[in-house]
Amino acid sequence: MMTREPLLLVYDGECPACRAYCQILTVQRTVGDLQLIDARESSEVMQEITSKGLDIDQGMVLKMGRQLYYGADAVHALALISSRSGVINRLNYQIFKSKNVSVLLYPILRAIRILLLKVLRKTKINNLNIKDNTKF
């Protein structure tokens, strides 16, 4: 029996919308187990994301095997591997199964997230250590 590598979903644990989305989402059993990783905590996968120059404040990351999916590509990939059980998972699939729709909607979702975090007075993760880049 072959063991599958876990799927890693890296998101901002201090964002209530991100946290709710990640906790509701379920993937098909045949794909593997989805592990949620808080981007605000140090981890191997966060080091990998940073080394690839991906700004976690601008998009979540899904790691499947050796492949990293970032932002709109991550929500699109998640839609394709998600289970269709439950209203939220079916809705997620219907909306984000199209790569074009994902690319169109992701910036809007990101803007809502930024506004929410600004209202909650959260700081940026700033994994790329950009000078004066701590506030939304």
Image (cartoon, rainbow, N blue to C red):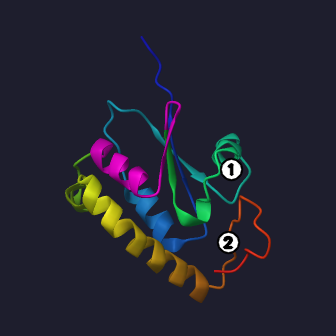
Give the magenta-colored segment's residue range: 64-82
Residue type at tag 1: Thr
Q: Residue at x 33, y 34 (%)?
A: 29
> Is 110 situated above or below 53?
below
| Kind of residue at disc 2 | Lys
Q: Nearer the viewer, residue 73 or 18?
A: 73
Which residue, as the protein is rendered here, is positioned at the far top? 1
Q: Which residue corresponds to the image point at 44% horizontal and 14% vertical from the top-left?
A: 2
Residue 48 located left or right of residue 81: right
Q: Looking at this view, name the residue that lies furthest to the bottom.
A: 119
- Of tags 2 and 1, which is closer to the observer? 1
Give the x, y percent position of residue 104.
31, 67
Q: Quadrant of the N terminus?
A: top left
Mark-to-mark CA distance, 2 and 1: 14 Å
Residue under numbered circle 1: 50
Q: Percent from the top left, x then y, of residue 76? A: 33, 52
Q: Is residue 65 above or below residue 83?
A: above
Q: Is residue 18 magenta?
A: no
Query: Label 2's element?
Result: loop
- Which residue is denoted by mark 2 in the rendering? 124
Q: Which mark is residue 11?
A: none
Mark 1 surroundings within 10 Å by alpha-carbon count, few (fewer than 14), some (14 through 19), many (20 or more): some
